[in-house]
Amino acid sequence: MRILLTGSSGWLGRFLAPLLRANGHSVTGLDVAPGADTDVIGSVADRALVDRVFAERGIEAVIHGGALHKPDIARYPAQAFIDVNVTGTLNLLEAAAKAGHDRFVFTSTTSLMISQAIRDEAGDAAVWLDEASGPLEPRNIYGVTKLAAEQLCRLAWLNDGLNCVVLRTSRFFPEEDDTHRALSGENMKANELLHRRLTAGDAARAHLLALEKAPEIGFDAFIVSAPTPFARSECAELKRDAPAVIARHFPDALELYHAKGWEFPRSIGRVYDAGRAERRLGFRCETGFAEVLDALRAGRPLPFAHDPAYISPKEDAAPA
Ligand SMILES: NC(=O)c1ccc[n+]([C@@H]2O[C@H](COP(=O)([O-])OP(=O)(O)OC[C@H]3O[C@@H](n4cnc5c(N)ncnc54)[C@H](O)[C@@H]3O)[C@@H](O)[C@H]2O)c1
């Protein structure tokens, strides 16, 4: 198909554009910043530009990954989030419906499921999060605008019959966490693969599958994250003594961690359950915590990217 991929210069775009091409699709990349997979430089908030790209490129389906996201909260005003994440999504949905498309894939975020209370981890048990969790009370403008965009996707399906798959991905960024720096970046990422992270390669694969399956699905939103080894029944213990739970699931993990100078998380406050994506979309991440341990055992490179110097290309391109 002729796909419009927004955010093509970004971290996800770098994995997704080549994967789409390898699967026989022709990709038009649209991004505000230049990149190897970007053909059109411009904003999704520019409706005239979106219409022109659709017409000139004969676009047949959209994968909408371009966005202002969490690190941008410190860099942009709330209005910019509304313009890009809400108006931009509406522009693409309306153009897709007008062109008679039968599918649309939207990259959303698990972040919109995190209220201030969940974020504060004030309870005495980890919070188990799946698609039925709610009420959704996002704690920042990023989450609020992503939730609004998800709802626009639902309306496009309801009103225009545009099949939309929403992927609420957990973290896959390569840079350091912008708030927690207690452990080394690689150690943090390995820990997060237990309950709140996936690799960028897996995120790209989920988008390809969502594109293929959208006409069967209609509208739905899925959490996309590495499969957690934990069970709901372990939530209290995860909060109280996460190392004990991890050691029960992975008996040699502590030894492998010690050899690397890594530490387990002392407490885990939330777990994303990606089971529904597996059951309904048929998607399961290839890389999780077990694969990290396999790599440590075999002395192989870690199966995820860590790049403390990564910065969104639009910031790189911005004049100093
Ligand atoms: N990285 C993560 O951990 C993570 C987690 C959950 C969800 N997401 C979502 O995944 C998607 C991709 O994020 P990423 O990690 O690749 O980030 P990124 O910043 O590397 O890429 C996002 C891209 O979107 C582009 N963009 C920004 N404004 C735009 C506009 N107005 N028009 C067109 N393009 C625009 C940026 O220039 C950038 O290249 C985003 O929708 C983000 O919200 C990311």
Image (cartoon, helix red, strand yellow):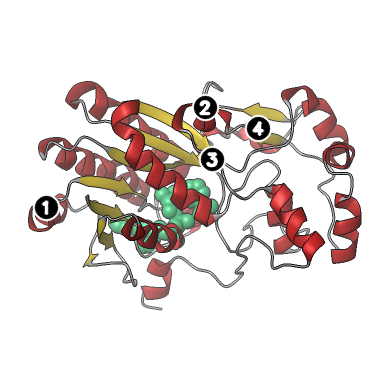
Q: Is mark 3 within 8 Å of ligand 1?
A: yes
Read off the residue under disc 2.
279
The tag on residue 58 is 1
Q: In this rendering, which labeled residue sits more in front, label 4 or label 2?
A: 2
Along the polypeptide, which appears first: circle 3 or circle 4? Answer: 3
Q: CA distance from mark 4 to mark 2?
A: 26 Å
Q: Nearer the viewer, residue 126 or 281?
A: 281
In the depicted structure, whether residue 201 falls above or below residue 112: below
Residue at x 41% of width, y 69% of height = 313
Q: Which circle, 1 or 2, is nearer the viewer?
A: 2
Ligand 1 quarter of the rendering: bottom left
Instruction: Answer left or right for 272 relative to 220.
Output: right
Q: Given contact means CB atoms under 8 Å apart, are the residues at marks 4 and 1 in contact?
A: no
Percent of width and height locating residue 114: 58, 35
2 or 3: tag closer to the N-terminus? 3
Q: Residue 118, which numbered label?
A: 4
Distance in Å between CA atoms under marks 3 and 4? 11 Å
Give x and y (percent) for residue 271.
67, 35
Q: On the rendered structure, is 271 left or right of 214?
A: right
Give the x, y percent position of residue 133.
Answer: 56, 23
User: Which residue lies at the image location 28% right of the left edge and 39% below the top edge?
Assistant: 104
Report the front residue among 160 and 178.
Answer: 160
Return the x and y of residue 205 as percentages of the image width and height. Answer: 45, 49
Q: Which residue is mark 3?
A: 111
Q: Spatial distance from mark 3 to mark 1, Cα to Cα? A: 34 Å
Mark 1 or 2 closer to N-term? 1
Disc 4 to disc 1, C-alpha distance:
44 Å
